[in-house]
Structures are given as C-alpha cells and as structure tokens.
Image (cartoon, rainbow, N blue to C red):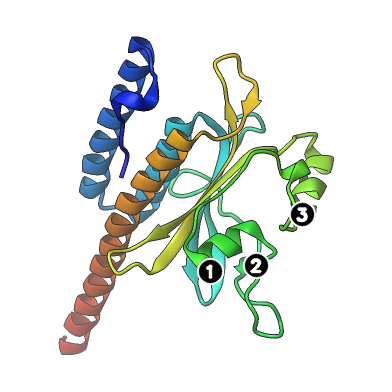
Amino acid sequence: MVEITAHDGLDHAEEQEILSRLERLNAIGVALSSERDTLVLMEHILDAARDFADADGGTLYLVKDDALHFEVIRNTTLGYKMGGRNGPKIEFAPLPLRLPDGTGNHGMVVAHAALTGRTINIADAYDAGGYDFSGTRAFDARTGYRSESFLTVPMKDHSGKVIGVLQLINAKDERGHVRPFSNFDQQLVESLASQAAIVLNNRQLLEQLETLFESLINLIN
C-alpha cells in the first residue's frame, strides 16, 4: 500500500509528481487486466516497473520447476531488449532456487527474494555484503557496464505464493546519474508487482483452461 502523509515534508512539485505516478499506477493496473497476450503482458509489467523507478535496466523472472526463468530483459544503456513478445528468445540458463544439497540458494539475491517473499533494496552491489554478486561483476567486466543499485521485488499471487520476481537495476536521477532506489520507488514497484502477479496468474490459468478445452474438443472429434 502506497501512502502519503502530511509529515513527508514534500513541496508542491514533489507532491504533484507523486500523485502523477500514483495515477499512472492505477492506469497500468487497468491496462494489465485487459491484456490477453501473456508475453506482451510481461513486457508491460517490466516496462512499467522501470518507468516508475526510473531504472536503466531490469529483468522479469517466472518461477518454474524450482528455478527462476528469464522471461524479459531490458537495459537502455546496453540496448538490450530480449524476451517477451518483441525481443529475441533468452538463452540464459534458469537460476536454481536450491543448491545441490537441497538448501535454499540464498546467496543469490533474486533467488533469496523468491524464497523469502521479501523485497531486497541494495544501494550499491559493489559495497554490499551477504550476497554473491560475482556473476554481476563478471558481466560488468565484459560489457563495461556498472550494475550498482538493485531493487528486487517478489511477485505474489492472491494466495501469497511467489510466482515470479522483478529485478530493477540502476535507478537514475534527473541528471542521469545512478542513484539508490528510494522507499517510494520500492512502494510503487511492490504495488505494481502485487497487481501484476494476480493478473499474470489469472492469465496463465485461463490459458491452461483454453488448452484443456481444445484438448477435450480434439478428443471428442
């Protein structure tokens, strides 16, 4: 729940910006509910999350077979537009939620968010302890990019089950400099993720019913 109180100490321009972003959140919720194509729906979810938080990049993962599967990847600086309906297929291997011994893969931030159902907001991955960012650093070394601020938000359906994860990278300020994700960024993206997970879950259930119906028709024929 996104709340604004009189004690936030915001000036008029900041209040108007927040109200504008809340209106966009409501509009996005309506738009997501009307989208019937799951691949397009996932693109809209990630694009909206990046827009809300002014994030340079982001990834949407879905939980399948005890692993996180890459569904959509976007990065403005690197020009990445992968997955979804309009990008090339993502060939990256899924990220396991469990280690070989069966314990949770809590060293990987995105897996930890999926396993615990908790949002993780990291100001600087190069100065953060507790998580394994070796893969991120290797990626940065190859591309010349610097993956600094991270916002990782689990997507929970109506029953509280985590069905996916939104991970945003490098929030930008008005000058284009990387900044940490603010508490308000986090609240907005969490609200979006909650709405999106329910819509996405409903869309997947409808697709399963449609597939079952078609199978029954073919069997009868």
Image quarter in which the N terminus is found: top left
Whichever of callouts 3 and 2 sits on the residue coming sooner in the sequence is 2
* Residue type indicated by callout 3: Gly
In this picture, residue 110 sits left or right of residue 39: right
The amino acid on which the numbered mark 2 sits, given as a three-letter code, is His
User: Residue drawn 57% across and 21% down?
Assistant: 173
Q: Tell me if residue 207 can be seen.
A: yes
Picture mark count? 3
Q: Position of residue 91 (x, y in %)?
A: 63, 58
- Circle 2: element type: loop
Q: Which residue is drawn at 27% across and 45% down?
A: 32
| Earlier residue among tags 3 and 1 | 1
Q: Give the x, y percent position of residue 113.
A: 54, 60
Determine which of the numbered discs, if any, sits on residue 106 in the image. 2
User: How far apart, in angstroms, are the residues tagged by discs 2 and 1?
Assistant: 8 Å
Q: In the picture provided, is 75 more to the left or to the right than 146?
A: left
Q: Which amino acid does label 1 sit on?
A: Leu
**Dot 3: few (<14), some (14–19), or many (≥20) neighbours within 10 Å?**
few
Q: Quadrant of residue 98?
A: bottom right
Report, in whole angstroms, how far the alpha carbon at label 3 lies from the one at label 2: 15 Å
Dot 1 corresponds to which residue? 115
Residue at mark 3? 135
Foreground disc of the pair 3, 2: 2
